[in-house]
Image (cartoon, rainbow, N blue to C red):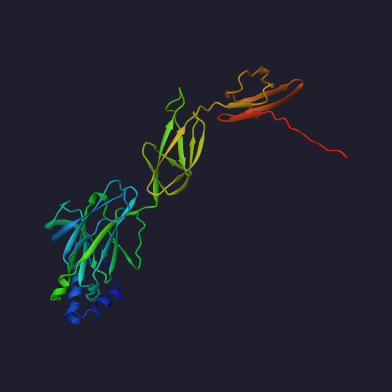
Amino acid sequence: MLTLISAKKLRLMLSGENQCNGCNMTRAISILAIIMIFSGIPLHPESFRADVRGVLTISADRPESSEPITIGIDGSVLVNLVSDVRFVRGVELEITAPQGWLQYRSSIMMMMFNNLNHNTAAGITDFEGRRIAAEPLPSRLRIIYHVPIRQQHGLRNTTSVTVTANTAPPDTLPFLFRLQPIEKGLPARFDQFKFNVTARPIYSDEGAVKITTRFPPNQRNRPFTVLIDDNVINSISEEIILKEGEHHLVILSDDYRNESRRFIVERTKVIDLTIELQDPAPLIVFEAPQNASIFMNNVQVTNTREPMTIDTGAHEVRFQIGDYTVIKTLNVQRGKTYRVSLGVDLIISEDD
């Protein structure tokens, strides 16, 4: 993969805005040579020496930025991401430059490497690693890079943020951020410049749901199908990653009652959802005044406080209070609950 530099950016590099100890022709040759060297991202590991000033350790559980590490014009930092990274799509690096840096446009090269042969290091260290990014450090006082850690990251370049073209998957971390001067013969004050580097996780707009099912007695481990937002879920043994927002869960089965739930997933959170699977036999619940007699298929119902299991098909329900009788036919379907109520209306009329 090539690192492309636009004509506009190249004109800025070759412009006379940097008047520091050199003519434009010398500067142009130097910059063009650097571009040719670093324009390709090698497929094989590179060997290099770096002055590591510390490790920026960030946690997927804490959104805040790490404590800053200060590096010089040829300094480096290691960046590591710990804990669960399921909801992290990248790492944000923020470099705060000194005020005088604006006078030395494109005088420093930025490089990043992953797949390092050392996971921890301090001071001057010899490394082997794969280069994932390289470009002249932008002439800004606040410089931000986004380093994706997965392929489908959705990160985009903006006027203030640069997204590296290559990813740094979690199993290739830590990665190394390195500065290296491009030009020689710069004034002594240039060597004294210090850059503060911080890092923080970039979260995805995702969360997860953990589904737990409980079975009715004597009906364990019968087959059922789980759908979320009309998509079949092949396994609920692990947490299911979903976009933040409202989702619809449906359970379909020939051995249990069908279930339907709506739930909300929050960003970076895991929601626990417990489903009580129920016997699919139909149930009937009666509601009537205490002095009412209730009959089902001409058999008196003696316990009306608890739901009663019935067979599918047609059933005759009779309510009787004194000489007043109401009879209805009920067509019962599998997996349904029926509530049968006897209501008594109070009617008031007024005549002139």
Q: Residue at x 55, y 30 (%)?
A: 335
Left or right, 226 with reference to 87? right
Residue 81 visible somewhere in the drawing: yes
The quadrant where residue 147 appears: bottom left
User: At x 17% / y 75%, what residue is drawn?
Assistant: 30
Q: Is residue 43 visible?
A: no
Residue 118 is situated, as x and y percent measured from the top left of the image, at 15, 52
Query: Position of 254 compared to 113: left or right?
Result: right
Where is residue 340? Give x, y as percent. Answer: 65, 28
User: At 46% from the left edge and 40% from the top edge, which residue is drawn?
Assistant: 227
Q: With respect to residue 205, does 185 lie above or below? A: below
x 39%, y 47%: residue: 207
Tell me: residue 185, above or below residue 121: below
Query: Which is more toward the observer, 165 or 139?
Result: 139
Count the numbered circles shown.
Answer: 0
Horizontal and vertical percent for residue 352? 88, 40
The quarter of the picture where residue 347 lies is top right
